[in-house]
Image (cartoon, rainbow, N blue to C red):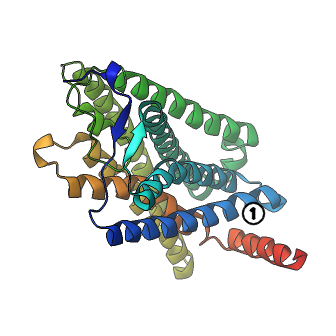
Amino acid sequence: MSNSSSIRHFLLLALADTRQLQLLHFCLFLGISLAALLANGLIISAVACGHHLHTPMFFFLLNLALTDLGSICTTVPKAMHNSLWHTNNISYSACAAQLFFVVFFISAEFSLLTIMSYDRYVSICKPLHYGTLLGSRACAHMAAAAWASAFLHALLHTANTFSLPLCQGNALGQFFCEIPQILKLSCSHSYLRELGIIVLSAFLYFSWFLFILFSYVQIFRAVLRIPSEQGRNKAFSTCLPHLAVASLFLSTGFSAYLKSPSISSPTLDLSLSVLYSVVPPALNPFIYSLRNQELKAAVWRLLARGFHKH
């Protein structure tokens, strides 16, 4: 029996038993992470360099791209390293840091998705008040609130999780350090405190999701009054994917953190964690950003400028 003070490292879940499958996982993660890094990097560069893109919508898209970059860089590189070098060790401090950044970037991302739904709601339903409600100062305050609340949220969860006495070994059933997996190692009822905080966080996320849902319902009602069919189709094709991503993000995150231990299995846990921590950072650029004509044109100009220099 060991307690948390004697644990120097954790053992992460090996994604495969055979060397060929480990290399396949490495290649898959490499492809996903390169796509996410390239797409999000292009969005950040295009918005930062394109002065005509310095509007609230693109400001929030830039912030979302930053959370996606942070999120993919927190979980995937360690999993790739472990698959390539056939190891599954992570030090105690690295595990705490990884857990902090996972919660930090995921919290910031969902806050930003909520703010972005409000931005779309004001631009479509209250266009005359857009400049007043979403001025540069208001946007800066909303983004700062999203990042600050995510920091405090991550700090609370990390401090609480790593203050628990651990005596059920050091093997985590996940490819990164995740709160539910560490709670399984706890040997006292202290874990109920962290479980309570998770439930409170879930209520907070659900209330944000309801706000997103309400915003899009109002948008759909306004869109249905648009006389042109092309205008309606454009609005629906923009809003529905946003709602789908937010729903996937929330439902898989809820399932991972709130599901009963009796229905837990390595395959299910792994699938859920990939769906909420790896898939959104790779998909968000294509769903939220690169379908926007202005941003697409700015990215092409940026790439063309880079080619001309070479």
* 267 over 102 or under it: above or below: below
Coordinates of residue 175 in the picture (x, y in percent): 35, 50
Left or right, residue 167 beside residue 73:
left
* Res. 225 visible in picture: no
Please name the residue that numbered disc 1 is placed on. Answer: 46
**Which quadrant of the structure image shows residue 295?**
bottom right
**What residue is rendered at 51% in x and 74% in y?**
232
Nearer to us in this view, 293 or 290: 290
| Quadrant of the frame with the C terminus | bottom right
* 290 over 101 or under it: above or below: below
**Which quadrant of the structure image shows residue 133?**
top right
Coordinates of residue 163 in the picture (x, y in percent): 35, 19
Give the SS element for disc 1: helix
Coordinates of residue 202 in the picture (x, y in percent): 32, 37
* Residue furthest right as drawn: 309
Coordinates of residue 83 in the picture (x, y in percent): 40, 59
**What residue is rendered at 31% in x and 54% in y?**
14
Nearer to us in this view, 113 or 159: 159
Nearer to us in this view, 70 or 289: 70
* Res. 196 visible in picture: yes
Left or right, residue 270 beside residue 286:
left
Nearer to us in this view, 157 or 48: 157
* 268 over 310 or under it: above or below: above
* Residue furthest left as drawn: 262
| Quadrant of the frame with the N terminus | top left
The amino acid marked with disc number 1 is Ala
